[in-house]
Image (cartoon, rainbow, N blue to C red):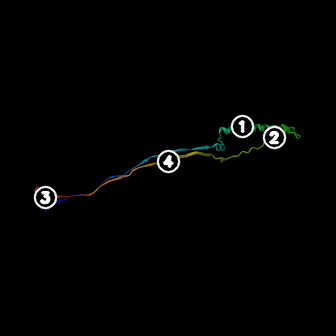
Amino acid sequence: MYPASIGIKTVSAQLLYKQIPPVLNIETEKNGYTMESHPIRMELDNEEFFNDIGIKSQACQRRETIAAGKRAVQEFMARQAREKNAMQGPNGLSPAEIAAQPEAMKLAQLVFIPAHSPKVSWSGGDVDIEYTPDEVVINWTKGDLNFRYVPYQVEISVDKWSRRGYV
């Protein structure tokens, strides 16, 4: 028998890996809103109210003056026709008798509360709102896992003894 030595060298198995984490990127695109306001436009018509209380517009005064002129002409013409007919009829009247006849009584009336109130109207008063929702953009890169398996190793060696030592 010869002296010998047995050598055993082992390398453990290894799992080598590289992990790439996922990346999540979230961006918000702001859109917002626009708003446009149309204010109320008030319209106040006081013409009939002012006419009732005696403050008349120039247009109303002109209309009344024209109407009064027409009435005066018509009344004059009617009076002339009545006088002419009164003098010519079978029972003719003298001018003095015609002048003594009573005229139609005109009624005067006091009004304390106006019959018409001011007319109030309006237009507008709108608000236009245009809203565009924000947009969310999501960019996602999935992660990755790279690995490599290195199996175990066993090295066995037998060395023989000689006078010079192990060979």
Write down the residue under mark 2. Answer: 100
> Callout 2: helix, strand or loop?
helix
Is tag 1's residue or tag 4's residue first in the polypeptide sequence? 1
Q: CA distance from mark 2 to mark 3?
A: 179 Å
What amino acid is at disc 3? Trp
Is tag 2's residue or tag 1's residue first in the polypeptide sequence? 1
Left/right placement of residue 49 relative to residue 139 reads right
Write down the residue under mark 3. Answer: 161
Residue 95, compared with residue 154, is above or below; it is above
Q: CA distance from mark 2 to mark 1?
A: 30 Å
Left/right placement of residue 149 relative to residue 139 reads left
The percent position of residue 83, horizontal first and vertical second, equals 83, 38
Q: Residue at the spot x=74%, y=37% of the render? A: 70
Camera-near label (2 vs 3) is: 3
Dots 4, 2 in contact, CB < 8 A: no
Q: CA distance from mark 1 to mark 4?
A: 59 Å
Dots 3, 1 in contact, CB < 8 A: no
